[in-house]
Image (tube, grey):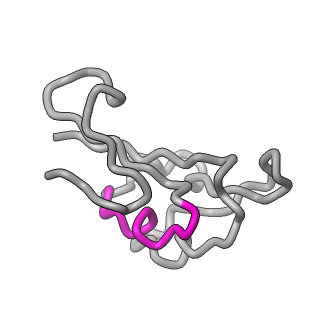
Amino acid sequence: MRKELVFIKDKCKGCAICTIFCPKKIIELSSETNEKGFHYVIFNGNKKEACTKCLNCALVCPDWAIEVWQEEDSDQIPGGDRISGGASHNE
């Protein structure tokens, strides 16, 4: 089963709580801002592959701005089960 982490920049208010709880310390605030004027979270450089998909960031995000897409045998992440903002997940 493959998971992919997705940051939803327009939901992010730049609180950076997720950066504190990331065990790999691979999440940071962007120098750019979203449409609300907040610096949103991104992966440090090209460290996305280092993400273990532990869900810590999604679980602590107060705005559900981090989603984890999960798939079983499909090549399309959107076809899998949606894990949104740490509310619940299927494994």
Note whether 16 is above or below 41 in the view shown: below
The question of residue 33 being in magenta is answered with: no
| Residue 69: % across, % down | 34, 41
Note whether 5 is above or below 75 in the view shown: below
Note whether 32 is above or below 25 in the view shown: above
Residue placed most toward the observer, 21 or 69: 69
12 relative to 36 in the view: left or right: left
Note whether 17 is above or below 82 in the view shown: below
48 relative to 4 in the view: left or right: right
| Residue 30: % across, % down | 72, 55
| Residue 29: % across, % down | 69, 62
Work out which quarter of the rendered image holds the N terminus and state it. top left
Q: Name which quarter of the figure residue 56 lies in.
A: bottom left
| Residue 35: % across, % down | 81, 45
Residue at figure coordinates x 32%, y 42% from the top left: 82
The mark tally for this picture is 0
Q: Residue furthest top?
A: 75
39 relative to 79 in the view: left or right: right
Residue at figure coordinates x 58%, y 56% from the top left: 44
Q: Name which quarter of the figure residue 2 lies in.
A: top left
The stretch in magenta equals 53-63
